[in-house]
Image (spheres, rainbow, N blue to C red):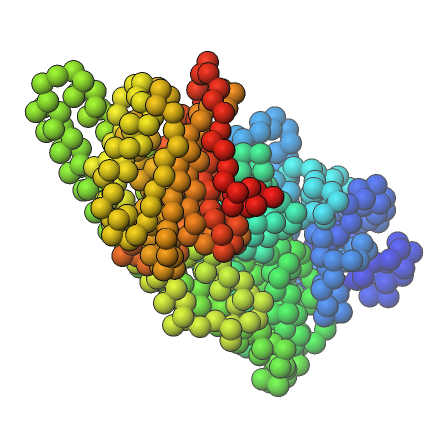
Amino acid sequence: MRQLVHYYSNYKTFQKWTEEHHIKDSSKLLIEINFPDSDQQKLQKLLNKMHNNFPDSIIVGMQSFTSMSNHQISDFKNDPIISIMEFQSSRLTCEVLDIGINYVKGQAPILDLTKIGKHLQPDTKALEILSSYNQSSTSSYINEIGTYFGHLKIFGGGATHNQQNRHQFVFHNNIIYPKAVILIFMHGDNLNVELFQAFDWKPISKKKRITEVEGNSIITIDNIEALNIYKKYFPNIEDDPSVSIQVPLYITKNNIPSTAHILDIDFKKQSLKVAQELEVGDVVQLSIGNYNAMMNRVEEIHEFLTKTPAQALWIASCISYEYGFRIPILHYISTIKSNDHIFGYSTAQEYFNTENQLNTYHNHTFIMATITESISDYIELTKYTNENIGPFEIANKNLYSIMHKTASELNQLTENLENMVEQRTKELNNLNKDLQVKIKNAVRKEKSQNAIMNQQSRLASMGEILENIAHQWRQPLNHVSWIMNDTLIKAQLGRGDEIDIAQLAKNVNSSIQFLSETVDDFRRFVDKSSDLAQTFNVKKAIEATISLIHETLVKSDIGIKLDCPDDIKYKGFENDFKHILMNLINNARDAMEERKIENGRISIRVYHEKDELVIAVQDNAGGIPKPILKNIFEPYFTTKHKTKGTGLGLYMSKNMVEKVKGNIEAVSILNKKTTFIIKLPDKGAIPTPPPKLTDEEDEEKE
């Protein structure tokens, strides 16, 4: 037998080429066409002419958006490439499974085993499969074919489309099929087919479990929208969905690794549509091509071709290789001397099976099939030397080695961190249970309904505090996620030398310590509670609050002045009101002590303005710088030493004010005074004029 490859430009030139090579119509002629264009009219004209001139030959092929020509790979050429295998003693038969007939979306077509079984003969050796049926049920359909013909050497792949046209096709003789599987059976006592397959993908992210599926769509992973597994590392995936091809999902199932081909992304549902059926509980990770392993295949493939008799070659290169790993593919074919033995497709899926193998359907692999009728003929090769691998390839191997090592270290670090977080969470849950037990015991001891309602209020308040705990834990966890993402991106960009693993671990441990301190900070608040809403005298509430800390103010030589009418009353939460004033006074006192202010003064003024009760608390502690002023109401923000504060005072005060639809703000002039203004809704109150400003305050206002 012989194989010839023609780079097609026009039919007249093709006819002349066939005449020069004495190619004549025969049932032993397999004409296979890689058609990289989406123009089906152009293809139809070519097929009609070829079918007229080669009516007894088998003419097959499929759309493939890349071409192998002259030892190069290109996705810019639209001209077909034609491979002709001329067998001597072997026979060929073909069957087209037209799935477009009676096709129901989402359902696997029924395989007519009787129809395809008639092709099975005692000397049948191999089966080539070409498919444009790239759907979720393709895997089970192809695997069923592979099981039925499990004793044969099976190879093939799925058609691919270009970016402009998303509808791929296959063809047989002069008919184009938008949804079909073509089976080419090869028979003959002297026929021999050997297969080589490479799967070189390595996981780079932490393991996650699929938690919800819908048909062939992954809805959630770890109870989070499935697309989040990509958005965490590629936030612009909506602008470049090809990321899902370059970085496929790596699956570990029954201890067998594989990858999933993502057919489409539903950005509305944030879900992933895959070309095979996955189940809840399947473990998935992001993966990237192991460039080092791929380049090591160069010598392995050369060795395979050196020792394996072959008169023809057939190649399938996964679309993911084409997107990011063309260099290894070029090296795979670099030592094949003649262009007549370089023919193949860029495939959406790959079909590969040897005797007793479980699955025929595969993703993201490289496949090479050798076909021969003579055990003494070999593909002519150029000499292989390590010198063929230049500095560019070596640099890439080193880069990917660093990246994979860094990814492994980050995955281990992440698992350790999650274990620590899980432990802290258990401790927090135990604390919750203890608190609830204490509350229930306290409720039992109370005899009056008012006491019971008060304890219920405390329980509700604790619920809010626990919600804040959960919110606060997200901040250090997000920080850790950012550290890992930044490290991964540096590795991908070739900046691995900027990664300091020791510093990275130090930063992560710092965040873990912060998580622990968070629990301690909130412990101080679990015994605080608010009263029931009731009407109280504002002046008396303020005086009661001042009396609680009067001694500390005297000790620090701080005077406090209250300007409030005797008859102002307000309906609200008196304990919250006192708590807010306590926080403001304590903050002012601490600032004065820290700055050693002499003759410290705090003034509190209360008046009605329209439908609002206004409380202004002013101090002469020297003001707050603008960069700090904008952050003072944020949780855990503090300029004090941790022994003097947790950064929760103003945050909790703001929450209490907003709970009654009020507002609190701060106005400060550096080196002078700071005024906190609280406005509480008080509809129907009689307005009272604000206290007259002193001369010094007039100057400040100006």
The residue at 30%/52% (across/down) is 557
Residue 133 appears in the picture as rendered? yes
The residue at 16%/21% (across/down) is 451
Q: Quadrant of residue 205?
A: bottom left
Residue 81 % position (x, y): 77, 58
Question: Compared to 197, does 459 lie above or below?
Answer: above
Q: Nearer the viewer, residue 185 or 483?
A: 483
In the rendered view, does 83 fall on the left or right side of 547?
right
Residue 139 appears in the picture as rendered? no
The residue at 30%/19% (across/down) is 534
Q: Nearer the viewer, residue 601 or 143?
A: 601
Q: Quadrant of residue 210?
A: top left
Residue 519 % position (x, y): 26, 48
Quarter of the image that includes the C terminus: top right
Residue 338 % position (x, y): 72, 73
Residue 239 % position (x, y): 66, 47
Q: Nearer the viewer, residue 544 or 524?
A: 544
The residue at 52%/68% (across/down) is 491
Quarter of the image that includes the N terminus: bottom right
